């Protein structure tokens, strides 16, 4: 391992030791005096069951641990003074003992042992019959039963009113067997739920491993919640101690799957060592079963649990900060609870009196469930984000489709209009246009009609051509003006006027279309017609760029003020102004002796 990993290991070890010291200093379940009750700390230890010889001892009492699986017995006596007659119901409250006991009051058996059930994790409250408390003092005899390889012990106990002692016994029972039984029920529910989830999501093996961890936790919790020995002592002890090692192994597998880690050797090493330890314990004398099981659990489980902490820290970037804090804290606490239990079970004279290891599966499993729920919540948030993104995309695509549909509808409408326009143009060209041309040809060939009629027919023909050009060339103003030039050049030549075309750019109308083009053509046509009729000019200049169209001549001009003051002014100028407004252009006109200039300044498109 690198120096960095060693530093992390040292830091985690310091953290775990600190938590263990805090748990030890907290001294949960400390046996202290109870107001209103007598605390018994001095008893006489009998040499035999008849108590022919006794020796005073101070509680707590711990027997010598030796390798034997045979049940042994230790008998103690104590004389309890009390009031006569008793004012209330009396009781004995024994917070901690190992493993079971018989109780006599004045040689009358009031509590028989419940072997093979064990009371090592159960506080005992015994009601005392009032009839046995008639004398001024009570002789209390306690007979402890247990296995020497685990040791017998008896902590200070209490004699007093039942209503005083019962709440203390109930609270201690809740902290010990009560919580163990509650956690056992929770583990059964979690096991069923996780295995059901895994049956639907077979590829996600983390649910399987966490479910199996909950299964092995039930073995631990059954021992702490009921204290029963199932089958032979060796198999029963090996079963519940191995469950702790299996629990850590399955949690290790769960974490590797959950974080998608590749490091698998800790699992294999843990499984191999556990299998070897079980085989050695099974072939060893039963008197060594308990000690060997505890040592195997300590030597296998504690390093694996520590490895889980190190793996988690090294891969903390795979979790959110909150998930890391919750899981690392719970895993650290679980390891500390295991170390604390090792101290209680392996120490010859432990100075702590309540077991807390049954809290480990509760803490650890809830932490794992937290991780699963957190991942589920993050997945749901991701699905919500994805759904929102998809909705936005659908909305955007719908808008694009609507726009495309509107555009397609507009294209089809314009195509229909264009088709109709082409039909009208064709009808005008072949119908009216053909009739006008035929009429002029008839007049020429038969030498009939006067010049005014001829001129009117030619003007009508040019006007029709102008309409057709504006409809056909509505997208290009320069092309339209070029067509107009071609149509008018013959007329201008008759009057001795030449064109000076100056095209510097393509003017763009605000709303281009056939009607707009026709308005523009009419303005230019009106301006050129006015030059022919009134200006006596020999040159017409047409200037075109992107923003304006100017038509100017070198004629003699006219007095604009005088023209404006006439009772019936010319309609041509007014019509040009109206048409300029229609196409979104500004109309201006100047005239003097050097000629007239009409300017159309086009507005920019918005």
Image (cartoon, grey):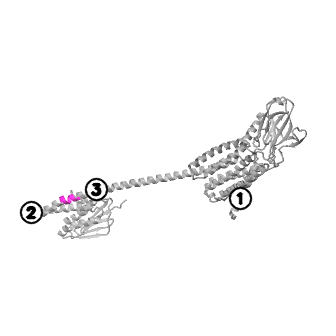
Is residue 164 or residue 197 the one in the foreground? 197
Tell me, for residue 448, which label it has, or none: 2
Which part of the image, by quadrant, shows the N terminus? bottom right
Q: In what element is the residue under mark 1? A: helix
Q: CA distance from mark 1 to mark 2?
A: 122 Å
Residue 210, given in percent of the width and then of the height, sits at 63, 50
Residue range corresponding to the magenta coloring: 425-432
Q: In what element is the residue under mark 3? A: helix
Say if the magenta span includes residue 427. yes
Q: Are marks 3 and 2 in contact (CB under 8 Å)?
A: no
Q: Residue at x 60, y 47 (%)?
A: 195
* Disc number lying in front (1 or 3): 1
The kind of secondary structure the magenta stretch mainly shows is helix
User: What is the tally of numbered marks visible in this picture?
Assistant: 3
Q: Are marks 1 and 2 in contact (CB under 8 Å)?
A: no
Q: CA distance from mark 1 to mark 3?
A: 83 Å
Mark 2 is surrounded, within 10 Å at the Cα level, by few (under 14), some (14 to 19) or many (20 or more) other residues, namely: few
Judging by the rendered image, the residue that carries numbered circle 1 is: 11
* Disc number lying in front (1 or 2): 1
Judging by the rendered image, the residue that carries numbered circle 3 is: 417
* Disc number lying in front (3 or 2): 3
Is residue 110 or residue 353 the one in the foreground? 110
Say if the magenta span includes residue 244. no
Q: In what element is the residue under mark 2? A: loop
Residue 276, given in percent of the width and then of the height, sits at 72, 55
Q: Dividing the picture into quarters, in which one does residue 317 lie?
A: bottom right
Residue 569, given in percent of the width and then of the height, sits at 22, 58
């Amino acid at each position: 391992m690198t120096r960095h990993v060693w530093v992390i290991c040292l830091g985690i070890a310091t953290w775990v030791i600190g938590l263990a010291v805090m748990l030890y200093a907290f001294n949960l379940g400390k046996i202290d005096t109870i107001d209103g009750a007598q605390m018994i700390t001095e008893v006489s230890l009998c040499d035999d069951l008849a108590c022919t010889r006794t020796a005073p001892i101070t509680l707590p009492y711990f027997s010598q641990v030796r390798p034997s699986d045979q049940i042994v017995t230790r008998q103690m006596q104590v004389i309890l003074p009390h009031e006569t007659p008793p004012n209330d119901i009396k009781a004995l409250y024994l917070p901690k003992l190992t493993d079971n006991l018989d109780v006599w009051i004045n040689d009358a058996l009031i509590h028989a042992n419940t072997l093979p059930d064990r009371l090592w994790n159960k506080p005992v409250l015994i009601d005392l019959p009032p009839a046995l408390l008639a004398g001024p003092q009570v002789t209390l005899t306690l007979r402890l039963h247990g296995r020497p390889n685990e040791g017998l012990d008896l902590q200070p106990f209490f004699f007093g009113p039942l209503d005083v002692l019962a709440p203390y016994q109930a609270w201690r029972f809740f902290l010990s067997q009560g919580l163990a039984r509650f956690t056992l029920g929770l583990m059964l529910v979690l096991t069923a739920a996780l295995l059901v989830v895994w049956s639907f999501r077979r590829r996600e093996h983390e649910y399987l491993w966490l479910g199996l961890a909950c299964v092995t936790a039930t073995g631990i919790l059954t021992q702490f919640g009921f204290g029963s020995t199932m089958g032979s002592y060796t198999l029963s002890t090996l079963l519940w101690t191995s469950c702790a090692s299996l629990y850590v192994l399955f949690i290790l597998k769960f974490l590797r799957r959950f974080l998608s880690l590749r490091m698998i050797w800790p699992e294999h090493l843990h499984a191999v060592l556990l299998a070897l330890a079980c085989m050695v314990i099974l072939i060893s004398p039963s008197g060594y079963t308990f000690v060997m099981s505890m040592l195997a659990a300590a030597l296998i489980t504690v390093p694996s649990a520590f490895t889980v902490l190190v793996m988690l820290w090294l891969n903390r970037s795979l979790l959110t900060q909150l998930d890391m804090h919750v899981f690392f804290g719970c895993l650290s606490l679980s390891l500390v609870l295991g170390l604390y239990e090792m101290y209680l079970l392996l120490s010859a004279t432990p100075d702590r009196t309540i077991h807390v290891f049954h809290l480990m599966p509760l803490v650890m499993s809830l932490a794992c469930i937290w991780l699963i729920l957190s991942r589920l919540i993050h997945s749901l948030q991701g699905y919500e984000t994805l759904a929102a993104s998809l909705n936005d995309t659908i909305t955007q695509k719908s808008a694009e489709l609507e726009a495309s549909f509107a555009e397609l509808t507009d294209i089809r409408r314009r195509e229909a209009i264009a088709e109709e326009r082409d039909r009208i143009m064709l009808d005008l060209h072949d119908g009216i246009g053909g009739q006008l041309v035929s009429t002029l040809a008839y007049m020429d060939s038969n030498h009939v009609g006067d010049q005014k009629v001829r001129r009117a027919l030619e003007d009508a023909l040019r006007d029709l051509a102008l309409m057709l050009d504006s409809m056909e060339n509505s997208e290009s103003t320069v092309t339209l003006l070029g067509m107009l030039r071609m149509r008018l050049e013959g007329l201008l030549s008759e009057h001795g006027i030449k064109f000076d075309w100056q095209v510097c750019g393509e003017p763009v109308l605000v709303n281009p279309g056939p009607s707009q083009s026709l308005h523009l053509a009419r303005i230019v046509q009106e301006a050129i017609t006015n030059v022919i009729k009134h200006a006596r000019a020999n040159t017409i200049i047409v200037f075109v760029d992107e923003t304006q169209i100017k038509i100017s001549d070198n004629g003699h001009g006219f007095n604009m003020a005088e023209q404006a003051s006439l009772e019936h002014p010319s309609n041509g100028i007014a019509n040009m102004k109206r048409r300029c407004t229609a196409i979104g252009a500004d109309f201006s006109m100047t005239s003097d002796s050097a000629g007239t200039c009409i300017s159309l300044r086009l507005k920019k498109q918005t």
